[in-house]
Image (cartoon, grey):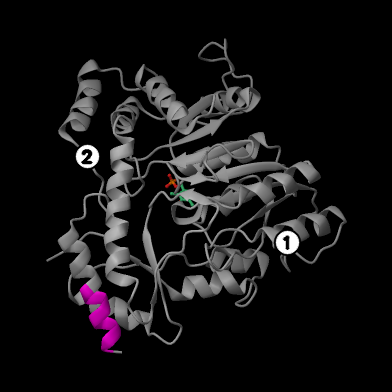
């Protein structure tokens, strides 16, 4: 028996949609990208959507348009996929990490408020010990970790109070809701991502969703080599990028969007099976859903092991049964290049470090069967019992 860590959920109709693009020979800048954008703008509930080549590209363009210039500061989380902090490095700006809430793994909003106050007052305490950046503070980049929205009520107030851009990394949270409001609708703009392990896939791909027309227009120009509306092919109003999404990917995304509710419901079912198998087990903490999360969108299923459990040994024993598992996340501030550049040390963000140290992501996708979930759960229980 071999269970994959994740699998895309694809139908014959979706494969057919890609094949039709290939037969049409119109492989880029055709009708599929706007169709896909329209479908997701409608699903998320934003006025604008701009498809790009990856979630990272979507975040990068948000950061650019937010006016994050060299030396400036952006408050963000160390408990995320590295892309959400790297996009500041692309602009020679400094990510200012703030530790996370123990229950959800999302930004601790009380600490964000203190950091914003202190940085606005010119205090240095939140800055890294090396290469701190001169400021000013330009924005907050929050991440909806594991499909659960960050605490946007307070984050929106802090951003407004200090005149900061607020960017939502909703790459893991398509379909989630915070107090009845959909993920992707918070702040100035949000990034979505469509890598094969995400809730909806295009292979590689991403999208910016926003209600701000100025941001949507600028981002659409920047993804297309800086061509503003009306520019000829070799006319470039801005220094831009090639961050375009191709037509095959967009066709797949559009087709997947037609059954997005089903894709999300299947993942929720798999998470419920895991929950049923694991919530009573000694030594395991199952995912916590905050009171503010009116709808969870299941991206991964990550349990926490008790601190005394030897995680490496558990992972080895699972692997022996053909079951992969992952550490989710290794905190960003302890990645080698972050340590080298900013001088971070173990202990700088203790909650993020603890969550990383105790995390174990189990195989997860919308196409897992109940039997597979039971085998993984039983293997995990056995591995814990043999400690
Ligand atoms: C997936 C993901 C991204 C974007 O990833 P790409 O591979 O560039 O599409 C960004 N942030 C988070 C938190 C993610 O999980």
Residue found at the very far right of the displayed protein: 121
Mark 1 crowd level (few <14, some 14–19, many ≥20, 10 Å Cα): few
Q: Which mark is residue 273?
A: none
Disc 2 marks which residue? 10
Query: In terms of depth relative to the viewer, which is nearer, 53 or 101?
Result: 101
Tell me residue 102's x, y (percent): 56, 68
Tell me residue 131's x, y (percent): 73, 61
**Label 1: which secondary element:** loop
Tell me residue 250's x, y (percent): 35, 28
Q: Is residue 243 visible?
A: no
| Viewer-nearest of discs 2 and 1 | 2
| Range of magenta residues | 378-386
Task: Pick whichever of labels 2 and 1 is earlier in the sequence.
Answer: 2
Q: Is residue 370 visible?
A: yes
* Mark 2–mark 1 distance (CA, rounded to whole Å): 46 Å
Query: In terms of depth relative to the viewer, which is nearer, 196 or 135?
Result: 196
């Amino acid at each position: 028996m071999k269970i994959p860590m994740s699998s895309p959920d694809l139908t014959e109709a979706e494969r057919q949609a890609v094949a039709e693009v290939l037969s049409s020979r119109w492989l880029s800048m055709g009708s599929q990208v706007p169709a896909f954008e329209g479908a997701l703008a409608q699903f998320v509930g934003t006025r604008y959507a701009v498809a790009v080549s990856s979630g990272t590209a979507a975040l990068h363009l948000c950061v650019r348009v937010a006016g994050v210039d060299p030396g400036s500061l952006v408050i963000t989380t160390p408990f995320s996929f590295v892309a959400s902090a790297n996009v500041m490095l692309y602009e020679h700006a400094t990510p200012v990490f703030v530790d996370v809430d123990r229950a959800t793994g999302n930004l601790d909003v009380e600490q964000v408020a203190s950091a914003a106050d202190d940085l606005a007052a010119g205090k240095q305490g939140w800055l890294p010990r090396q290469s701190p950046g001169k400021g000013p503070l330009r924005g907050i980049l929050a991440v909806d970790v594991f499909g659960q929205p960050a605490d946007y009520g307070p984050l929106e107030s802090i951003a407004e109070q200090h005149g900061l851009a607020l960017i939502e990394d909703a790459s893991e949270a398509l379909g989630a809701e915070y107090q009845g409001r959909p993920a992707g609708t918070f702040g100035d703009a949000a990034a979505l991502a469509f890598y094969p392990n995400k809730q909806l896939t295009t292979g590689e791909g991403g999208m910016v969703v926003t209600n701000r027309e100025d941001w949507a227009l600028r981002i659409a120009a920047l993804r297309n080599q800086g061509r503003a509306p009306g520019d000829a092919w070799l006319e470039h109003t801005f220094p831009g990028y090639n961050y375009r999404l191709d037509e095959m990917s967009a066709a797949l995304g559009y087709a997947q969007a037609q059954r997005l509710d089903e894709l999300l419901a299947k993942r929720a079912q798999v998470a419920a099976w895991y929950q049923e198998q694991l919530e009573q087990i000694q030594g395991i903490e199952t995912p916590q859903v905050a009171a503010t999360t009116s709808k969870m969108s299941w991206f991964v299923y990550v349990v926490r092991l008790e601190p005394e459990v030897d995680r490496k040994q558990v992972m080895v024993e699972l692997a022996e049964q053909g079951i992969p598992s992952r550490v989710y996340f290794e905190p960003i501030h302890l990645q080698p290049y972050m340590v080298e550049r900013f001088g971070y040390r173990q202990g700088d963000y203790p909650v993020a470090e603890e969550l990383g140290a105790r995390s174990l992501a189990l195989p997860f996708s919308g196409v897992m069967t109940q039997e597979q979930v039971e085998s993984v759960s039983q293997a995990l229980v056995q591995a814990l019992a043999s400690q």
